[in-house]
């Protein structure tokens, strides 16, 4: 239908159907020739038409609303499919068991999802069974049997004692299995016993120690280890502590409380933690700073000392030490960084293994000595070591030319800073053997270093 407007205000309609025989009609319905009566015009719509229109509007609204909801659902499904998330509707959830739901949730948590252009990755370390299975054969329990000596009113008393710790198998040579532990685990030991992962035990001997770094290497003779045990144990893989980051997961394995090997987990809490501890060898119990350590919240209890601190790859990145933490704190354990310890360990592994001499056969220098503590060394400019306060007549020390005022700083190349360390070294020396002492003698220009060979005497003589 086309509409044309003219100035005479008459509107003309072109007849449909392509037939214009009816001519042109004005608004009044006249066909152009007068005398034909006009048909009455209806000014409103009937009730039926209104109902039809309302129904049509409702249908159109329903159709468009349905299309809109369908579009939203399709878009959500598309995004979920792109993100790698499995879609499950309520009907499927009702038919899913709790075990299946837990499995689905666990799988979805471990996936990497990309939503709205953002990459989200979640990594949670909860299962360390494979790491423990791999490393446990390289960690041992260490038992230290010692004699505690006390003095009361001029009388000396002694009683046996024992302590427990841990160790890590770090190497093997032609005749020995080599293990690293803390120095305080093997200090003053009369006898050392190692227990392997299968429960078998063997005697161990001290190979070398570094008291300042709290490190020691002990050796077990291969002849004393059963073949079945050798097949079950392994050498630990040493990693690097230089690449550690705060928050990195770690695993601690050791002989906690002497009950046997146990496992704890945590994270690296801090790096290069400088610890101030009381020196037990100083007369005034002054505070001295000792090295830097890895701090972790993995539980490190008595007996864990000398055990392994591992990364998630099963590499040793630290040597645990319960001595540092103390009982006043919780969730703060410490370990010697393996990158700092490794050069010391390699040096100690190359030393000659020391075998304890029976007490009645041990050799003696024939001196009395006093510790030159660190603060006295700085205050008076004296070397740190053992100050000879007296020399016994006829002793090997007198024959070697040692005099009052000399300071012993090493024996057979091993540094000594206290009388207790000197006594400990002499327990490996038999009467009649010769030892080399490094001493510092006073002179007008200061202390001068000197090497002296001393033939050890017997206690009775």
Image: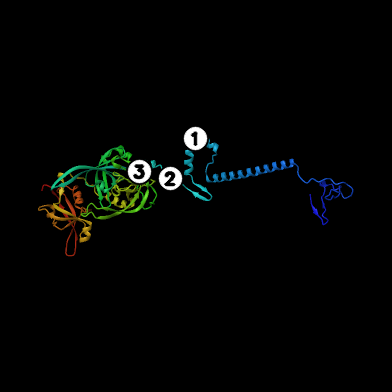
Q: Is residue 94 visible?
A: yes
Q: Nearer the viewer, residue 265 or 205?
A: 265
Q: Nearer the viewer, residue 57 or 388?
A: 57
Total residue callouts: 3
Q: What crowding class fits label 2: few (fewer than 14 Cα within 10 Å), some (14-19), or many (20 or more)? A: few
Label 1: which secondary element? loop
Image coordinates of residue 325 in percent, x first then y, are 30, 49
Q: CA distance from mark 2 to mark 3?
A: 16 Å
Q: CA distance from mark 1 to mark 2?
A: 25 Å
- The residue identified by callout 1 is 97
Image coordinates of residue 317 in percent, x first then y, are 35, 49
Q: What crowding class fits label 3: few (fewer than 14 Cα within 10 Å), some (14-19), or many (20 or more)? A: some
Q: Does residue 456 appear left or right of residue 346 in this picture?
A: left
Image coordinates of residue 301 in percent, x first then y, are 30, 44
Label 3: which secondary element? strand
Relative to residue 244, is residue 85 depicted above or below?
Answer: above
Residue located 54% across and 38% down the image = 90
Nearer to us of marks 1 and 2 is 1
- The residue identified by callout 3 is 264
Q: CA distance from mark 1 to mark 3?
A: 34 Å
Determine which of the numbered discs, if any, sits on residue 124 in the image.
2
Label 2: which secondary element? loop
Q: Does residue 150 appear left or right of residue 82 in this picture?
A: left
């Amino acid at each position: 239908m086309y509409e044309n407007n003219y100035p005479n205000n008459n509107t003309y309609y072109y007849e449909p159907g392509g037939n214009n025989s009816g001519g042109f009609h004005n608004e009044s319905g006249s066909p152009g020739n007068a005398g034909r009566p006009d048909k009455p015009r209806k000014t409103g719509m009937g009730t039926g038409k209104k109902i039809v229109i309302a129904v049509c509007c409702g249908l159109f609204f329903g159709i468009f609303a349905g299309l809109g909801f369908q579009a939203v659902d399709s878009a959500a499904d598309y995004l979920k499919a792109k993100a790698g998330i499995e879609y499950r509707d309520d009907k499927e959830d009702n038919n899913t068991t709790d075990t299946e739901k837990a499995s689905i949730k666990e799988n979805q948590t471990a996936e990497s999802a990309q939503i709205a252009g953002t990459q989200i990755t979640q990594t949670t370390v909860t299962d360390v069974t494979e790491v423990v299975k791999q490393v446990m054969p390289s960690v041992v329990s260490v038992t230290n049997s010692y004699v505690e000596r006390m003095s009361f009113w001029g009388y000396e008393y002694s009683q046996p004692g024992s302590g427990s710790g841990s160790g890590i198998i770090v190497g093997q040579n032609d005749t020995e299995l080599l293990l690293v532990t803390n120095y305080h685990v093997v200090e003053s030991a009369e006898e050392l016993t190692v227990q392997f992962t299968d429960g078998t035990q063997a005697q161990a001997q001290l190979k070398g120690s570094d008291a300042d770094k709290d490190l020691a290497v002990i050796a077990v003779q291969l002849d004393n280890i059963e073949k079945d045990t050798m097949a079950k144990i392994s050498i630990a893989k040493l990693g690097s502590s230089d690449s550690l980051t705060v928050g990195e997961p770690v695993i601690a394995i050791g002989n906690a409380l002497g009950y046997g090997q146990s496992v704890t987990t945590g994270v690296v809490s801090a790096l290069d933690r400088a610890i101030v501890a009381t020196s037990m060898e100083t007369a005034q119990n002054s505070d001295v700073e000792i090295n830097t350590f890895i701090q972790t919240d993995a539980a490190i209890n008595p007996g864990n000392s000398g055990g392994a601190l591992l990364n998630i790859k099963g590499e040793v990145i630290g040597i645990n030490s319960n001595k540092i933490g103390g009982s006043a704190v919780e969730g703060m354990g410490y370990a010697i960084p393996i990158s700092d310890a490794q050069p010391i360990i390699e040096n100690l592994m190359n030393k000659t293994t020391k075998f304890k001499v029976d007490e009645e056969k041990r050799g003696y220098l024939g001196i009395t000595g006093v510790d030159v503590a660190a603060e006295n060394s700085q205050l008076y400019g004296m070397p740190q070591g053992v100050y000879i306060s007296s020399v016994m007549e006829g002793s090997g020390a007198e024959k070697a030319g040692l005099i009052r005022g000399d300071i012993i700083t090493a024996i057979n190349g091993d540094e000594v800073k206290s009388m207790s360390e000197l006594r400990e070294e002499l327990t490996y020396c038999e009467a009649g053997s010769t030892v080399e002492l490094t001493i510092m003698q006073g002179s007008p220009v200061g202390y001068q270093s000197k090497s002296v060979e001393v033939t050890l005497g017997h206690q009775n003589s």
